[in-house]
Image (cartoon, rainbow, N blue to C red):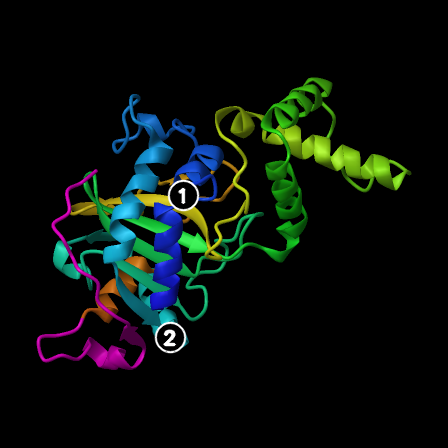
Amino acid sequence: MPEIRARMTDWARDPTLDGADNWFRFFLGPSPDGATESRVFDRVDDVGATIAGTLAVQLPAAELFYVSADMTDLARHAADTLTDYRLHPEDLPAQIGVMVYEHPPVQGTAAARHNAISIVTWGPGRGGLWVHTWATTSPSQQGIVRIGRTLAQLPRDEVLERARTAAARNLPEPTPENKPSDSDETADRVADHVLATFLPNLERAPVPPSFVPPHGYEWCALTPMEFTEMEGWPDGVSHPSRTTVGRATTTSPTWRCCWPTEAGGCPSGAGRGWTSAGRGPLPPQSPP
């Protein structure tokens, strides 16, 4: 657990092209669809930079929590009946935290690029609380990861020129039905499709050399939560190609089940399922 936090912190604070700032600039950008019209971000905000800066401050200070399979199943069961609720600051087991699940708490949270959610981080944000979800990269995406890493090694001007040419050709997405007979032509077609798809990303930032975060977990979404009565689960901010993680991530039920009582235990014997895996300093935090 401390090693996971350390790796995520190093990435969040890395000023190079392989750090969080460039990763969010490339994959998310300053104005992802709908984000700057939300209650959290304004049109003048640089969304990607704001998220990266927030993580750089909060991850080093996060307390660590591990949730066993039994505890995860209990929280999932609680989430099935949780529709309307009031979130209080005291519901949180820590002001800033990293929570690692033994197995994904909810099925159906996987998108094309990643597996189901297995890490949740949180900390202060505009309006109350920002919850981030993370997952490992799907094995099916190793091909595109290799392409991304190859592109990162090429001169940026060369990559941009080829991407613009590929986008202008407007080729269909490669499928078994339209696959060229020549293997080299097939590889070129796939590469051109990837370049055309990522043209907006390439125009705003260099390709991250590792393409996926070196610490092993991809950022999936940000869900802002208010300390007030809420109906359902609020809309979040995520990469356009990824699915939105619904309220059933079981984060809130897990927090409540994991919060120790004054006597030092957990309600309903829940202490058998979770571990507080270390404490970091908790300096005063201001919403970004």
Write the residue at 32% across / 45% down: 223
Disc 1 versus disc 2: nearer the observer:
1
Q: Residue furthest right?
A: 181
Note whether 109 is above or below 175 in the view shown.
below
Please name the amino acid that badge 1 sits on: Ala
Write the residue at 40% across / 50% down: 11
Graded by Cα atoms within 10 Å as few (under 14), some (14 to 19) or many (20 or more), the crowding at tag 2 reads some
Write the residue at 21% across / 53% down: 85
Residue wearing tag 2: 68
Note whether 217 is above or below 183 in the view shown.
below
**Residue 149: which numbered mark, if any?**
none
Nearer to the camera, 18 or 238: 18
Residue wearing tag 1: 20
Span of residues in magenta: 260-288
Q: Is residue 73 visible?
A: yes
Which SS does the magenta portion mostly show? loop
Q: Is residue 26 left or right of residue 43?
A: right
Note whether 219 is above or below 6 in the view shown.
above
Residue 221 in the image: x percent, y percent?
40, 45
Task: Tell me which numbered mark, 1 or 2, is placed earlier along the sequence.
Answer: 1
Q: Is residue 108 left or right of residue 270?
A: right
